[in-house]
């Protein structure tokens, strides 16, 4: 069982930055791939970024086209935490951001993830 708690959301002006954190419980955090998803009002949840479980030296990542070059996902297995650094934020990035975990390879499909956090609100003003 993995429990996830996101933090770091808030209100920021367009062009600004935020760093989201997702703290995970469980001793086998390093065995889980982690994903970030977001859901804007009236829209379906969409993939943002994912990072594989890694070996402590090399992590493979994926990004949605809409955030490539602006967002960066990383993890610190010693702290059981995954991060989403968000730069050059745009009003269209406004959404509730969720982190998710799955045992196995990273995936961009939300249905592949077994555990979800409660979400953190990110609002970007123009």
Image: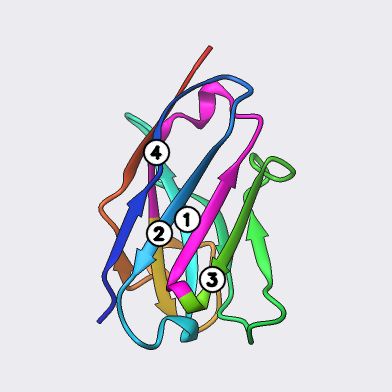
Circle 1 residue = 36
Q: Residue 9, labelled with which disc?
A: 4
The answer to whether the residue labelled 3 contacts the one labelled 4, judged by CB atoms less than 8 Å apart, is no
Point out the image quarter for the N terminus.
bottom left
Q: Residues within 10 Å of mark 2 (few under 14, many from 20)?
A: many
- Name the residue furthest front: 78
Q: Is residue 81 magenta?
A: yes
* Spatial CA span between label 3 and label 1: 15 Å
Say whether disc 3 or disc 1 marks the residue closer to the N-terminus. 1
Q: Are marks 2 and 4 in contact (CB under 8 Å)?
A: no
Name the residue located 51 percent from the left edge and 77 percent from the top edge: 77
- Residue of label 2: 22
Q: Which residue is mark 3?
A: 76
Mark 3 packing: few (<14 Cα in 10 Å), some, or many (20+)?
few
Q: Nearer the viewer, residue 50 or 42?
A: 50
- Residue 32 is situated, as x and y percent measured from the top left of the image, at 46, 80
Q: Which image quadrant for residue 24? A: bottom left
Q: Secondary structure at mark 2?
A: strand
**Local secondary structure at mark 1:** strand
**Span shown in magenta:** 79-98
Where 71 sits versus 114, above or below?
above
First in sequence: mark 2 or mark 1? 2
- Between disc 2 and disc 3, whose residue precedes? 2
Judge from the rendering whether residue 65 lies leftward or rightward of residue 41; answer left or right.
Answer: right
| Residue under the image location 45 percent in, 67 percent down | 81
x and y percent of residue 30 in the render? 49, 83
């Amino acid at each position: 069982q993995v429990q996830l708690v996101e933090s770091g959301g808030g209100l920021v002006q367009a062009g600004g930055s935020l760093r989201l954190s997702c703290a995970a419980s469980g001793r086998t955090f390093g065995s889980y791939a982690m994903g970030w998803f977001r859901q804007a009002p009236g829209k379906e949840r969409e993939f943002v970024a994912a990072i594989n479980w890694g070996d402590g030296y090399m992590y493979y990542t994926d990004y949605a086209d809409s955030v490539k070059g602006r967002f960066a996902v990383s993890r610190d297995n010693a702290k059981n935490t995954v991060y989403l650094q968000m730069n050059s934020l745009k009003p269209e990035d406004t959404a509730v951001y969720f982190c998710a975990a799955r045992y196995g390879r990273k995936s961009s499909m939300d249905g592949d993830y077994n555990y979800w956090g409660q979400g953190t609100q990110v609002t970007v003003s123009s």
